Amino acid sequence: MFEKYVAAALVFMVVVTAVASPLFAGPKSQKKSEIEKMMEKVAKLGVGKKVELTLRQNGAKTKGTITRLDATGFTVAEKRSGMALTFTYAELKNIKGGGSVMKWVIVGGVAAAIVVGVYASALCENEGC
């Protein structure tokens, strides 16, 4: 009788272990993939690129230029103070490149449209449209 209880307990423990293992392994692999995504994002931006980053712990934002990359983290020269700040990839919530070329193309296009509009308006007033 005692042997049946021991056998039932062992079967129960094996089943619980088999079911619970994938449940506990999931978040660790997910966090690893988030860190790998941040590593790829920072590597894609590269050294010398202006960035704006947000930290995971307190949501603090920092602007600066990436000065060094390595396997565990990277260094940013802060925009305001010029201090070199080192971050690990796990600390990052978000990072994006600053100084987009497309932004300046759009600003230039809007400025050109305003100039053309003002010129056309003045031309219509003088010569009649």
Image: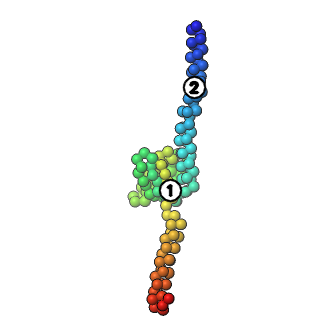
The residue sitting at 45% across, 52% down in the picture is: 54
Above-or-below relation of 31 to 96? above
Dot 1 amino acid type? Lys
The residue sitting at 60% across, 27% down in the picture is: 18
Numbered label attached to residue 96: 1
The x and y percentages for residue 58 are 40, 47
**Label 1: which secondary element:** strand
Q: Nearer the viewer, residue 68 or 92?
A: 92
Where does the N terminus fall, quadrant-wise?
top right
The residue sitting at 56% across, 29% down in the picture is: 20
Cα distance between the residues tagged 1 and 2: 42 Å
Above-or-below relation of 46 to 9? below
Q: Nearer the viewer, residue 73 or 98?
A: 98
Q: Nearer the viewer, residue 34 or 1?
A: 1
The residue sitting at 46% across, 84% down in the picture is: 121
Using the rendered view, name the quadrant where residue 81 is placed.
bottom left
Dot 2 amino acid type? Thr
**Label 2: which secondary element:** helix
Above-or-below relation of 11 to 67? above
The x and y percentages for residue 90 are 49, 45
The x and y percentages for residue 57 are 42, 45
Numbered label attached to residue 17: 2
